Structures are given as structure tokens and as C-alpha cells.
Amino acid sequence: MARFLTALILLAQVVNGAPAFDLLVDCLIRAKVPQYIPGSERFERNIVPYNLRFNFTPVAFTVPTSVPQIQTAVRCASKYGVKVNPKSGGHSYAAHSLGGEDGHLVVDLKYLNKIDLDKTTNIATVGPGARLGNLALGLYNQGKRAIAHGVCKFVDGAALEYLSNLPNELLSSVTEL
Ligand SMILES: Cc1cc2nc3c(=O)[nH]c(=O)nc-3n(C[C@H](O)[C@H](O)[C@H](O)COP(=O)(O)OP(=O)(O)OC[C@H]3O[C@@H](n4cnc5c(N)ncnc54)[C@H](O)[C@@H]3O)c2cc1C
């Protein structure tokens, strides 16, 4: 029975004689989607999770610089039955942006970090890869604007509940996702 299951798993990972992850990496290369090749130093460095207790190995790691590249990466993954995870800040406690398990395609959004402030409405359009530092600087440099934000090392439930009753916290500034 165990041998039968192993055979089934191997079968699922092989498409036309080549492992799905090889085909996926090849599909990304052919479509010119920037990626860190599995096993390379950059790949290994970028899959280190924020929480070192949760280590997962994606089958491929892309670093697109445009929306069409993201669409192509998703199409490649879909073609070979590989699950996809976007990664923004990478702070998920359970390493969900690495998939939360082995074998996903990671789409790292770090280069989609543009911040555009509309000075008539004071509404900013912010890319998913933008960090708080990028946001604070972008808003200030483009229009001398600011939003409530901060970094805290230790937040407990009570503190969150207290803060959530105050106006002007970061989330209340979000108009659309
Ligand atoms: C030390 C520490 C302190 C924290 N403190 C707080 C706190 O005070 N308040 C609070 O609310 N949270 C807090 N968190 C939790 C943190 O905000 C969440 O884990 C949040 O999801 C991290 O955002 P990220 O961009 O890093 O997500 P990632 O780790 O990049 O992704 C998290 C999940 O969202 C998915 N995802 C990422 N980007 C996108 C996208 N653009 N579109 C769709 N899905 C996407 C990923 O695939 C993954 O499943 C804390 C976490 C840590 C480690």
C-alpha cells in the first residue's frame, strides 16, 4: 500500500517525464519572469522565514517587476498544478508567504513598491511591496503628508483592543484594496 501511494505521489509530480518543478522553472525562464533559481545563493537567502521555526522550500521563487510578469508566473504555475503564494512583507508568523508548506511558487512583490499620492484627494495608491518606511517617506516627499504608523516589538491583545478604539490608526486610512 505504501509503495502504491509513493508511486501515486511520484506520478503527480511528473509531467511528460519531467518533474513539474523543473518544467515550472523552465516556463518562467522562457517567459522571462525574473526569478531566483532554486539552489542558488539568492534563492536560499530569500526563503529564510521571519519566524525561523517554520522552514518551507518553494519549488520556484519569482521577483516580478510588473503586473504582466505576475500574470505569466501564475499561468506557468497553473499549467503545472503548482500552488502560488504572493509575498509582501514576509512577516507572516507561520511563513504563509512561503506557502506554509513545501512545494509552492512564491511571487515576491518587493519590486511593486510604487507610491503615488494624488495631491487633490490626498489618496495614495501603494504597491503591495511597499514597506512602512517607503510609505512614510513617499507620502512626505510627495505631499508633506503622513499617516498613523509605527513599529512595536511587543503588542498584547489588550493593547490592540485599546488601539482599535482610537481613530486614525493605519487601517482606518485604507480606502480600497
Ligand atoms: C513581530 C510581529 C509583530 C506583528 N505585529 C502585528 C500587529 O501589531 N498588528 C497586526 O495586525 N499584525 C501584526 N503581525 C502580523 C502581520 O502583520 C501579519 O502576519 C501580516 O500578514 C504581515 O504582512 P506581510 O505583508 O508581511 O505578509 P506576508 O508574510 O508577505 O504574507 C502573509 C499572507 O498574505 C498573503 N499575501 C501577501 N501579499 C499579498 C497580496 N498582495 N495579495 C494577496 N495575498 C497576499 C501571503 O501569500 C500569505 O498567505 C505581526 C507579525 C510579527 C512577525
Image: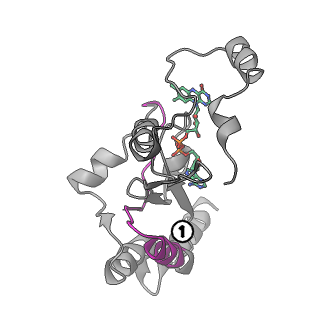
Q: Is residue 55 magenta?
A: yes
Q: Is residue 19 left or right of residue 120?
A: left
Nearest the viewer among 74 and 79 is 74
Residue shown at the point (47%, 77%) measured from the top left: 68
Q: Is residue 159 magenta?
A: no
Nearest the viewer among 72 and 132 is 132
Q: Residue furthest front?
A: 120
Q: Position of residue 143 (x, y in %)?
A: 46, 44
Q: Is residue 26 left or right of residue 103?
A: left
Q: Position of residue 171 (x, y in %)?
A: 67, 36
Q: Is residue 74 above or below residue 54?
A: below
Point out the stretch of residues depicted in magenta.
52-77
Q: Residue furthest bottom?
A: 16
Q: Which residue has dot 1 on it?
A: 82
Residue shown at the point (60%, 16%) measured from the top left: 155
Q: Position of residue 24 (x, y in %)?
A: 42, 75
Q: How is the image coloured?
A: one colour
Q: Position of residue 76 (x, y in %)?
A: 48, 78
**Amino acid type, callout 1:** Val
Q: Quadrant of the C terminus?
A: bottom right
Residue shown at the point (54%, 14%) measured from the top left: 154
Element at label 1: loop
Q: Is residue 126 above or below residue 71?
A: above
